[in-house]
Image (spheres, helix red, strand yellow):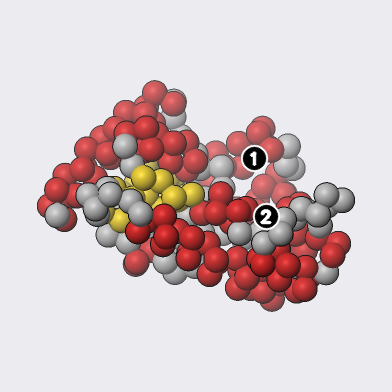
């Protein structure tokens, strides 16, 4: 089994790369999906969040109000640490179970937005970073998520720097061009991962 960490800054196109790798045959474990699962209604994770942050983080339907939770922790390091202490261990436990159930010769891609920020990058055989210039991130956030330029810059600044992510990378996909170029680059990356998996075995 080849264990790959996949990461990239906000609006880098990491999720698109994740989908493309899955189409090539990778087992993709998406930490964002798992993070939603572990705080679904009725879970111990959601109950613990309510204890930590109060019932106003819930919607009328009893689900986690992600926007309200985001506002609560954004810019508050202590609050974010409390949130991560509740969610991250549960996500990692769920990811470990999925990985353990994967074929022995699989290429398992862990899609983790905060791979560098949480210091997990050295736990994988290889790390793939989806990289774009910061101005491209800003433009995409304004265009696709309706953020102001200040909001976009604040979100980017709250993550690891571009240099920090690149320093952790074994493979870099630059996603500032066309979808066709990205598809070709991912196909080339997949060939390299297959070669590494063969050597790894």
The residue furthest top is 180
Nearer to us: label 1 or label 2: 2
- Vertical comparison of 68 with 88: above or below: above
Toward which corner of the image does residue 62 lie, by quadrant? bottom right
Q: Nearer the viewer, residue 116 or 152?
A: 116
What residue is drawn where x is 67% and y is 55%?
40
What residue is drawn where x is 32% and y is 28%?
184
- Vertical comparison of 108 with 190: above or below: below
The residue labelled by disc 1 is: 141
Numbered disc total: 2
Tell me if residue 128 can be seen.
Answer: no
What residue is drawn where x is 38% and y is 38%?
22
State the image coordinates of residue 46 (x, y, percent, origin top left): 70, 63
The quadrant of the rendering that contains the N terminus is: bottom left
The residue labelled by disc 2 is: 40
State the image coordinates of residue 58 (x, y, percent, origin top left): 81, 57
117 to the left or right of 109: right
State the image coordinates of residue 164 (x, y, percent, origin top left): 43, 61
Q: Helix, strand or loop at disc 1?
A: helix
What residue is drawn where x is 75% and y is 74%?
52
- Vertical comparison of 90 with 157: above or below: below
Q: Residues within 10 Å of mark 1 (few under 14, many from 20)?
A: many
Indicate which disc, 1 or 2, sits on the residue closer to the N terminus: 2
State the image coordinates of residue 50 (x, y, percent, origin top left): 77, 68
């Amino acid at each position: 089994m080849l264990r790959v960490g996949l990461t990239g800054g906000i609006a880098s196109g990491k999720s698109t790369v994740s989908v493309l790798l899955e189409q090539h045959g990778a087992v993709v474990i998406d930490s964002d999906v798992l993070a939603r699962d572990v705080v679904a209604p009725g879970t111990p994770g959601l109950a613990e969040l309510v204890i930590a942050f109060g019932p106003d983080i819930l919607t009328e339907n009893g689900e986690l109000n992600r926007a309200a939770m985001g506002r609560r922790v954004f810019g508050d390091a202590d609050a974010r640490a409390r949130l991560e202490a509740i969610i991250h261990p549960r996500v990692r436990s769920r990811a470990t179970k999925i990985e353990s159930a994967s074929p022995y010769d699989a290429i398992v891609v862990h899609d983790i937005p905060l791979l560098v920020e949480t210091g997990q990058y050295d736990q994988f055989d290889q790390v793939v970073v989806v990289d774009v210039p910061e101005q491209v991130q800003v433009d995409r956030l304004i265009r696709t998520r309706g953020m102001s330029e200040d909001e976009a810059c604040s979100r980017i600044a709250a993550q690891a720097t571009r240099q920090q992510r690149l320093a952790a990378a074994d493979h870099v996909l630059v996603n500032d061009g066309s979808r066709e170029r990205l598809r070709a680059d991912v196909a080339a990356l997949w060939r390299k991962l297959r070669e590494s998996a063969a050597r790894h075995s």
